[in-house]
Image: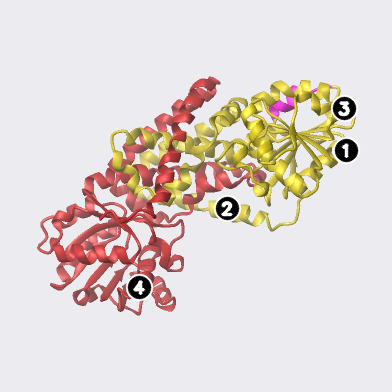
Chain colours: A yellow, B red
Amino acid sequence: MKVVVVGLGLIGGSAALKLRQTGFATDLVGVDRNDKNADKAVELGLVDNISDLSVVAEAELVLLAIPVTSMEAVLPSILDQIGEQTTVLDLGSTKERIALAVKGHDKRSQFVAGHPIAGTENSGPEAAFAELFEGKTGILCDVEESSKSALSISRDCFNHLGMHLIEMDSKEHDRHIAYVSHISHISSFVLGQTVLEIEKDEASIFNMAGSGFESTVRLAKSSPEMWAPIFKQNKTHISSALEAYIDNLARFKKMIDASDEVDLIKTMREANDIRRVLDGINGKAKNKQLV
Amino acid sequence: MKVVVVGLGLIGGSAALKLRQTGFATDLVGVDRNDKNADKAVELGLVDNISDLSVVAEAELVLLAIPVTSMEAVLPSILDQIGEQTTVLDLGSTKERIALAVKGHDKRSQFVAGHPIAGTENSGPEAAFAELFEGKTGILCDVEESSKSALSISRDCFNHLGMHLIEMDSKEHDRHIAYVSHISHISSFVLGQTVLEIEKDEASIFNMAGSGFESTVRLAKSSPEMWAPIFKQNKTHISSALEAYIDNLARFKKMIDASDEVDLIKTMREANDIRRVLDGINGKAKNKQLV
């Protein structure tokens, strides 16, 4: 199958590697507005060659792995240019605005809104690796808007990447993902920022950092260019999730200020229940596919 | 050497395992006010047998690995009971209140205030493993208050556990550790709490959680009984660190509400500098010992 990958970073590059490895893609063309990334992607063997966007006319599958605001801007014109047999699958982290951008488009049914719940704190073509998606969840949104053949190719693609699939409405997606992904990233970025501010006066502080600190600030290494558009596109849901988080932090701080050990222990016991959720995440890879 | 371990959880149990393995401890006695933990520790071979606190009189080294408020309460009476050749080394996460509790005690010089920067989100004797401390930082505080022989035994103990050592003042310790450990735990506990609150209405939300979420909420599995006393003892420093964190989060939320992509990117770029710090943490194990 001829696959065009638009955006040759961690996500697009990793998908390209895996789809070639499994034989799903026999012909891989890359598109990236950053020439250095494009050259690097060819050098690393992620794609066979580089083209401009017009190449989507000949593709069987176009994978979109660019920042979500660029996606919103460019997707309608990509649909204008595709052939009758082309499927376009996006891999972005927000879905509602993308859905609006193509609503009513003549070729809407050739588009599938996807979100692979996979990533690392690293970015760019050098960060790509074939196993990124293995055992992770792949979400398909608003499937009733896509044609059977476009859905079939997209499911096949996610299966070849090693993901198990779930389906949901794009609004529901954006509301939930604010809680289980977006505020995790914000809590980590801001924790990194706060501790670095203190470090200016206290040079020795990081001699004392351990694995717990490392775990909570790991995501602060993530790409600002990828995340600012996500925060902007999903701001309504993120804002309310963040408000709840800040309120709970302020309440926790009050308990500490009051040395209220009873309420502190009660709150932490409730939070301990996250163990059940995390065990569920780790068990997911073992479950059979949901779709 | 005859070693008494008071508190047979993750920290005390792991130290016991490693000190036996390296031959540092030839005779290991455990003390725990929880009979179930005590029995389990013998069953798991963490210690040879169980005794009450009076056993400290015969010990060459007493390791204290109990919640920090219990430590503060019990440490003076332990010092009252020890023999002339006994060294007491505590392994708690706060140091200033412990230092005050023994200030002016006749046997102050036989006590060494330590803090191994090591732990996991698991607790209890079953969570213990010999390699917990390997390559981690061991902090010794207020060393000028301890005798040469007590310091020598304590350094030897930390070296046998596999740690590299740094020294600092107990006040400085508590101020810094609030930033690089205590607010990491709070950010994680409260993130877990916030997402669980939403889950009540949105049962499917955790199908969507990925490794980023897992990383930031891992510490929310930690023991409330261990952490409430730490938050209480270090509340002044934690409160100001937490205030800075909440202020920065509120500022970040404002940028999102205003779709201020420029300032969002600027803030995240600054936070990206945490990569330098984390590379430093991972490089530490390779460095030669600092003390």
Magenta residue check for A97 = yes
The quarter in which the C terminus of chain B is drawn is: bottom left
A112 w.r.t. B118: above or below: above
1 or 3: mark nearer the eye: 3
Q: Is residue A90 left or right of residue B171?
A: right
Could you tell me if the residues under marks 4 and 2 are in contact, i.e. CB atoms within 8 Å?
A: no
Q: State whether discs 1 and 2 lie on one chain.
A: yes
Residue corresponding to mark 4: B22
Specify the farthest residue to the right: A84
Q: How far apart are labels 4 and 3 at the CA level?
A: 69 Å
Q: In this view, does B160 lie to the left or right of B36?
A: left
Residue corresponding to mark 3: A83
Mark 1: amino acid: Lys
Magenta residue span: A96-105
Q: How far apart are labels 1 and 3 at the CA level?
A: 17 Å
Image mark for residue A148:
1
The quarter in which the N terminus of chain B is drawn is: bottom left
Q: In the rendered structure, which disc, 1 or 3, sits on the residue that comes first in sequence?
A: 3
